[in-house]
Amino acid sequence: MRMPKLLVAFVIALFPTSQGNAEERWILPLEESSWRSIKVPGTVANTFTIGKGKVTIQSNNSASFRYYELPARLRSSAEVQWRWRVETYSNLFPQSERGQDDRPLAVHLWFDDSAGASLFGVVGSALGYPKVGHLMTYVWGAEEASGSVLRNPYYSKGRVIVLVGQNAPTGEWRSVRRDIARDFSAAFGTTADLTSLRYIAVSADNDDHGGQSVATVAALSLVTP
């Protein structure tokens, strides 16, 4: 007996067939309680408004981070994606120069993959900050051109990847989807241990030049193979 077409469609919807290129997209929680704070010593903290699938950062002569610790199932993710928008910013500055690298918005991937140096050092450990080895920082707003890959001026195991550089527009959403392993290889010249991806962070930084910015990240998610 042949099944009616409508019933066949219903069964397929309930029990989809597997595909070689199948992927699962995990949208990270964006509630206040899911994210922890890191302050920059001697600097006023940003104002974060978190909820409804997005985080808005207001920065006024300030700098700080919010970060999220990934559950084990997401630590081998192949891609990261999000949408972001900057409403206002004061100026664009060089991201490779210590004490100059203000920016209205950044998304960070932090890897717990090193037995030695850690991003936050001994003081960070005492304050309960996460242990971070390699890190990649995706930047909206830089003096350098889009596509630039720069050394983090504060940390040898860090790289800054400029996604929106000169002539950065405001007030419009931009979608981002990045291959984590490919970016890691291009940044460090070595293969990433994706199982060590432990944290995602967002930040704004206006403490060097006393600027102001308002920016939003939405639909921050990871794609698993």
Image: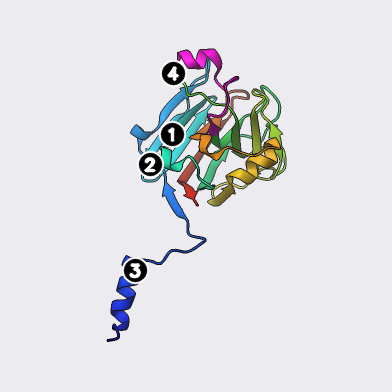
Between the residue at mark 2 and the residue at mark 4, the CA separation in whole angstroms equals 22 Å
Mark 2, residue position = 29
Residue 23, how many percent across, how many down? Answer: 47, 56
Q: Earlier in the sequence, mark 3 or mark 4?
A: 3
Q: Earlier in the sequence, mark 4 or mark 1?
A: 1
Q: Which mark is residue 182?
A: none
Amino acid type, callout 3: Ala
Q: Based on the displayed image, in which of its 4 quarters is residue 53 positioned?
A: top left
Judge the density around disc 3: few (<14), some (14-19), many (≥20) Cα neighbours within 10 Å: few
Q: Which mark is residue 128?
A: 4
Above or below, comparing residue 55 to residue 37 in the picture: below
Between the residue at mark 2 and the residue at mark 3, the CA separation in whole angstroms equals 26 Å
In the drawing, does residue 143 fall left or right of residue 4? right
Q: Secondary structure at mark 4?
A: loop
Identity of the residue drawn at 31% across and 66% down: 14
**Which segment is the magenta one?**
110-128
Q: Earlier in the sequence, mark 2 or mark 3?
A: 3
* Callout in the foreground (2, 3): 3
Q: Please say whether residue 13 is one of the residues in the magenta stretch.
A: no
Amino acid type, callout 2: Pro
Q: Which mark is residue 68?
A: 1
Q: Earlier in the sequence, mark 2 or mark 4?
A: 2
- Which quarter of the figure is the N terminus placed in? bottom left
Can residue 26 be seen in this snapshot? yes
Mark 3, residue position = 13
Judge the density around disc 4: few (<14), some (14-19), many (≥20) Cα neighbours within 10 Å: few
Q: Secondary structure at mark 2?
A: loop
Looking at the image, which is closer to me, 150 or 210? Answer: 150
Q: Earlier in the sequence, mark 1 or mark 3?
A: 3
Q: Secondary structure at mark 3?
A: helix
